[in-house]
């Protein structure tokens, strides 16, 4: 499954990812954001599992399994630009703010703001077609819980 997603992501013009590939790619982006500050701990994995469970109506066990697959995909995934563009193609425009809020909730889950995470999320927001203001609103919503 991971090789199929990587082949699609590395294509010159990536096609829209079908489910469950889109779900796995989103989970891998959550992992990439969590790892952006150089640490990847239980607080972040728990938050990713909650986001996946809520977003995809998964049991805690299924969400953790998806995250485990996503960790492998993230490690093998291409650069963030191509990766995020493929996720953009797989995400309806009206769902991108919710996605940005989820990404911020993972970044903020350890209680610290990191410059690397901020930089990554600024780039991801732009690649998703969102503005800095959209990203700031998503961050504020994530911070409120």
Image (cartoon, rainbow, N blue to C red):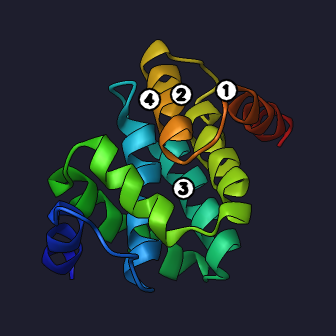
Q: Distance of mark 4 from mark 1, alpha carbons?
A: 12 Å
Cα separation, mark 1 vs mark 3, equals: 23 Å
First in sequence, mark 1 or 3: give its number. 3
Q: Quadrant of residue 130?
A: top right
Q: Residue at x 58, y 30 (%)?
A: 110
**Element under label 2?**
helix
Q: Position of residue 32 (x, y in %)?
A: 37, 44
Front residue of this view, candidates 83 and 111: 83
Q: Nearer the viewer, mark 1 or mark 3?
A: 1
Q: Which residue is mark 1?
A: 132
Q: Quadrant of the N terminus?
A: bottom left
**Disc 3 marks which residue?**
48
Q: Which residue is mark 4?
A: 120
Q: What is the residue that sits farthest to the front in this orientation?
A: 13
Residue 10, position in %: x, y?
Answer: 16, 61
What residue is pinned by disc 2? Answer: 122
- Give me the C-alpha separation between circle 4 and circle 2: 5 Å
Number of residues whose C-alpha sits closer than 10 Å to that of mark 3, classed few (under 14), some (14–19) or many (20 or more) = many
Q: Earlier in the sequence, mark 4 or mark 1?
A: 4
Instruction: Between residue 136 and residue 59, name the one nearer to us.
Output: 136
Which of the marked residues, 2 or 1, is nearer the chain's N terminus? Answer: 2
Kindly check if marks 2 and 1 are in contact, taking CB atoms under 8 A apart as contact.
yes
Going from the N terminus, do you reach mark 3 or mark 2 first? Answer: 3
């Amino acid at each position: 499954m991971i090789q199929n997603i990587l082949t699609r992501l590395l294509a010159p013009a990536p096609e829209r990812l079908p489910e469950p590939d889109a779900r796995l790619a989103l989970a891998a982006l959550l992992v990439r954001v969590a790892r952006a500050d150089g640490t990847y701990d239980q607080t972040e994995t728990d938050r990713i599992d909650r986001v996946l469970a809520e977003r995809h109506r998964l049991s805690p066990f299924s969400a953790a399994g998806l995250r485990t697959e996503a960790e492998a995909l993230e490690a093998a995934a291409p650069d963030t630009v191509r990766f995020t563009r493929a996720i953009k193609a797989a995400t309806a425009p009206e769902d991108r703010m919710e996605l940005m809020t989820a990404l911020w909730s993972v970044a903020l889950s350890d209680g610290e703001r990191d410059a690397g995470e901020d930089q990554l999320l600024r780039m991801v927001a732009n690649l998703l077609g969102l503005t800095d203001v959209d990203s700031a609103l998503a961050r504020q919503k994530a911070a409120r819980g």
